[in-house]
Image (cartoon, rainbow, N blue to C red):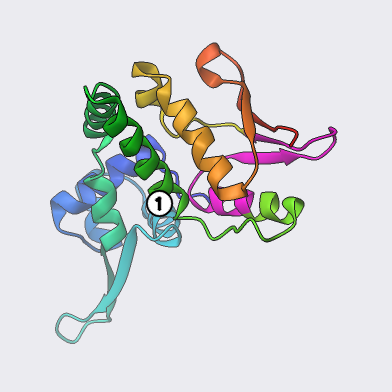
Amino acid sequence: MKSTALEPADKQFLEELHRLGGGSVQELCAQWGVTATAVRQRLNRLQTLGFVTRTQERIGRGRPHHRYRLSETGLKELGDNYAELAVILFREMQEFPDPAVRTQLRQRVRDALASRFRTTPAEPLPERLQKFRDELEERGYRVDVDFSRELPVLREHNCPYTDLANEDRGICELEQGVFERVLGVGMKLTRCCQDDQPCCEFSITPG
């Protein structure tokens, strides 16, 4: 499936395009001193990913030309600086003095995260896992499901909560809880990226 993950050069390109207020290929070439081919390739990539929009404009009697600007998704991408806030909020939730309230907060966050997925426990487990994998990939996760063992294993090859996990491994438990909630089965985190493993491995538990 198509990934919306941006390379550092993509992010820099978007920032410059936004600073200029958009522009045509010719204007961008003149501004950055690069070839039209390089600019078009980058614009086409970012337009395919949904971060850039293209409109046709005509000035005077000349031929119409295309002008490129950031889309709403592109603007959101430039403003996506929530990692630090997420770390602070998760830390405060974990340190809340009342244990009952702390547990309730964790459960509410787990349920809110699980509600984003369409997978339902009424489906056969293999179908649930396949659909869940597809939904995770749509959100930029890199995952696979291994059916070769007695019980299936879901592997996550890129940690979506790196900053949080570096601060508090409780986020790993929370993610396991989300997976259990979505799939309707017990799971165990048997390998973790935080332990210098190549992936996080969630194994289905018997029962």
Q: Quadrant of residue 144?
A: top right
The question of residue 134 being in magenta is answered with yes
Residue that sits furthest to the top in the current view? 195
Residue that sits furthest to the bottom in the current view? 61
Residues 205 and 141: in front is: 205
Residues 49 and 85: in front is: 85
Q: Estimate the x, y position of residue 21 in percent, counting from the top left.
A: 15, 58
Instruction: Find disc 1 in the rendering and name its residue.
Output: 42
The reply, left or right, for residue 130 in relation to residue 119 is right
Q: Estimate the x, y position of residue 58 in percent, counting from the top left.
A: 21, 81
Residue drawn at (27%, 80%), measured in percent from left and top? 64
Q: Estimate the x, y position of residue 113 in percent, counting from the top left.
A: 42, 47
Q: Which residues are magenta?
A: 132-155
Residues 110 and 135: in front is: 110
Residue drawn at (64%, 36%), measured in percent from left and top? 186
Q: Quadrant of residue 70?
A: bottom left
Q: How many marks?
A: 1
Q: Using a 10 Å C-alpha cutoff, classify the residue at mark 1 as few (fewer than 14 neighbours), some (14 to 19) or many (20 or more).
A: some
Residue drawn at (69%, 52%), measured in percent from left and top? 130
Element carrying mark 1: helix
The question of residue 87 being in magenta is answered with no
Q: Quadrant of residue 170?
A: top left
Amino acid carrying label 1: it is Arg
Q: Is residue 201 visible?
A: no
Residue that sits furthest to the front in the current view? 100
The reply, left or right, for residue 37 in relation to residue 65 is right
If the image is split into quadrants, where does the N terminus sit? bottom right
If the image is split into quadrants, where does the C terminus sit? top right
Residue drawn at (57%, 41%), measured in percent from left and top? 180
Residues 193 and 123: in front is: 123
In the picture shown, does residue 182 fall above or below 161? below
In the picture shown, does residue 134 fall above or below 60? above
